[in-house]
Structure formats: C-alpha cells, structure tokens
Image (spheres, helix red, strand yellow):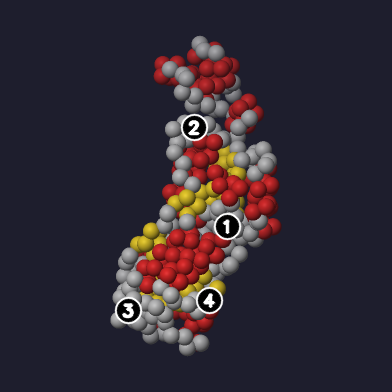
Amino acid sequence: MATIYQVSELAGVSLATVSRVLNKNTRVSDKTREKVENAMNELGYRPNSIAQSLASNRSNSVGILVAELHGPIFGHMMAGIESELRAAGKHVIITTGHSEEEKEKDGIEFLLSRNCDALILHVEAVSDEFLIELSKGTVPIYLMSRYVSELKDHCISIDNCLGGYLATQAVLAQGHTDIAYITGHQYKADSVNRLIGHKKALAEKNIAFDENLFFVGDYKETGGSAGLKHFIDNKRSFSALVCANDEMASGAMKYAREHGYELPKDLSIMGFDNVIFANYLYPKLTTIDNPVSDMGKMAAKLVLKTVYNQKNIEIQNIFEPKVIMRKSVIEHK
C-alpha cells in the first residue's frame, strides 16, 4: 500500500505540501496540486482518514441528532445539512432521539463517542439547562428549531410565535370567528409558541380563546382525525380549524370527508410547515411555510464558519414564516 512519503517523493514536494493538497488547502498552486494528484493516482494512494484525523485533530464529521428519521420535516432538514457539509468535504453521522429525554441524551453520547467535530441537535425533551451545560464541553453544539437565549448564537430556528399568529390571522381575515385549534404535545417548544401566536391573533380581534375548541394532538395524522372527532362528538360549532402542523391537518381533512363534510365549503382548514404533500391534498392545503431545508443548510454554514473557520459566510439565526394561500381556507359567509 502506497504511503504519503512515496507520494511526496514521486511528486517532488514536501510532506507538508501533500498534506495541504489532501486537506484542500487553498495555499497550493494548481500546478503543484496537479503533480500531487497525479502521483497519488499513479501509486493508487488512498488517504487514511483516521491518520488524517489524528494529525489535524479533526474528524471532518459532524453529528446530527433528530427526533425521527421518517416524515418530510426531518428528511428535508437532514438533506439541507448534509448537502451543505458534503460540498465542503465534511460528512455526517446521524442518530435519533425520539423526543424522549434518555434517548436524546444517549444519542448525544453516541455522537460524542464518534469524535465528531460538532453536533447539530434537534432535541425536544432535554432541558435548556442540560444544553447549556453540554455547550461548555470541548465539542461545539448547535440547535435546530429550538431557541435557548444563552446559546442564541448557536441556534437556528423559526419564529413559531409569529407563525402561529399568521396562521390564525389568515383564517380570521376570511371572516371566521369560531375557530377550533389542534396543537401538538405541550412539551414541545414549537407547539407552545405556535399556540401563543394563535391566542394573540384571537385577542387582537377580541375573540376569547375557547378551551372547548382546543385539542392536544400528536403531530401525526392521527392527532388531526382525533381532534376533529372530539369537536364533532362534543357538538362544538366552528367554521374553521387551525392545525399546528400539516400532518394533523391532513388527518383532519380525511376524517372530515369520511364524515360527510364538503371541503372547504363546510370547513376551512389551515396547516403549518408547508411539507411537500400540502400542495397535493384536496383541496390544496393553505399553510405556513417552515423552511427547514434552508434552516438545515444555515446550521451547516454556522458549523463551517465557527468550527472549520470558513470565511465570508453570512449567518441568519432566526427565520420568518410566511402564509402560503391555497384552497383549503375560504371566506366565511
């Protein structure tokens, strides 16, 4: 097996120069880089990533922890992170936390044991205090879709309060005043903040928040269908339904049609996230855009800037949601 020493001899350059070529250092001329690459090809040299890691004190890998591997949100988030890091010659190691405290902590320990240069965490169950303490370690951490004020420069998040407000405001603008709301689990910060925004929009119109038109779902289709069933079974009167994510909205739409509702004539439904299937539901789902792919790319850029010292990278820590008007919310007459 060829060695780095043989590459340097054949190319007629120093070991340091070969190392700079391997690490994609820009301080190497194109002519020299070509000589080194030709020598590696001729010798069939393959760089030893472990040896490179020991020499540079970098593994060139970034750990990612997400709640789940399935679902459009997490897929787009991971794709955004991975594409940006791969373009910079870095790789990712992925694990899950399943929104459970012990599993999130176990996933973090696993990533730390893999000698990752940094961790990008989408965590929902561990406390802010745990994350603040974790940030004092030797491996930098970055938070996705979560805001911790003490770690604000390491957070990439969307303004969920504004998103919740815009969702309900869009429904109110169509003349609806009796509005049901299906939220997610209340240990999730995004669920709590979207609900805060919903209540703010109602208050601005002097509409009291009605606990009888409120249901805690599970961020899955089952939560949407269970929520709508709950409202119907309790004979609640409402002309619009706001759901804290698109999956619950789709479950509610399915249940409504199965029980004789003509959508959107009989019931307007609003979602949140703008996942890929929202544009293919019938009627097409009015929703709030949650740009998780762009946020994932931004988290990767933050790592590249602060861990790998890449220059000329502008960072946006907080993303603003926007309303995507389609066909599922119409004027109430």
Secondary structure beneath disc 1? loop
The residue carrying mark 3 is 332
The residue located at (49%, 83%) in the rendering is 231
Q: Is residue 176 above or below residue 43?
A: below
Q: Which amino acid is tagged 2?
A: Gln
First along the sequence among labels 4 and 3? 4
Tag nearer the camera, 4 or 3:
3
Q: Are marks 4 and 3 in contact (CB under 8 Å)?
A: no
CA distance separating discs 4 and 2: 46 Å
> Which residue is most to the top?
12
**Residue 49's spot in the image, x, y percent?**
59, 31
Would residue 276 be found to the left or right of residue 223 on screen? Answer: left
Secondary structure beneath disc 2? loop
Q: Which amino acid is tagged 4?
A: Phe
Quadrant of the rendering where the N terminus is positioned = top right
Quadrant of residue 111 within the rendered picture: top right
Quadrant of the rendering where the C terminus is positioned = bottom left
CA distance separating discs 2 and 3: 52 Å
Q: Is residue 4 above or below residue 148?
A: above
The residue located at (51%, 37%) in the rendering is 304
The residue carrying mark 2 is 310
Tag nearer the camera, 2 or 3:
3
The residue carrying mark 1 is 67
First along the sequence among labels 2 and 1? 1
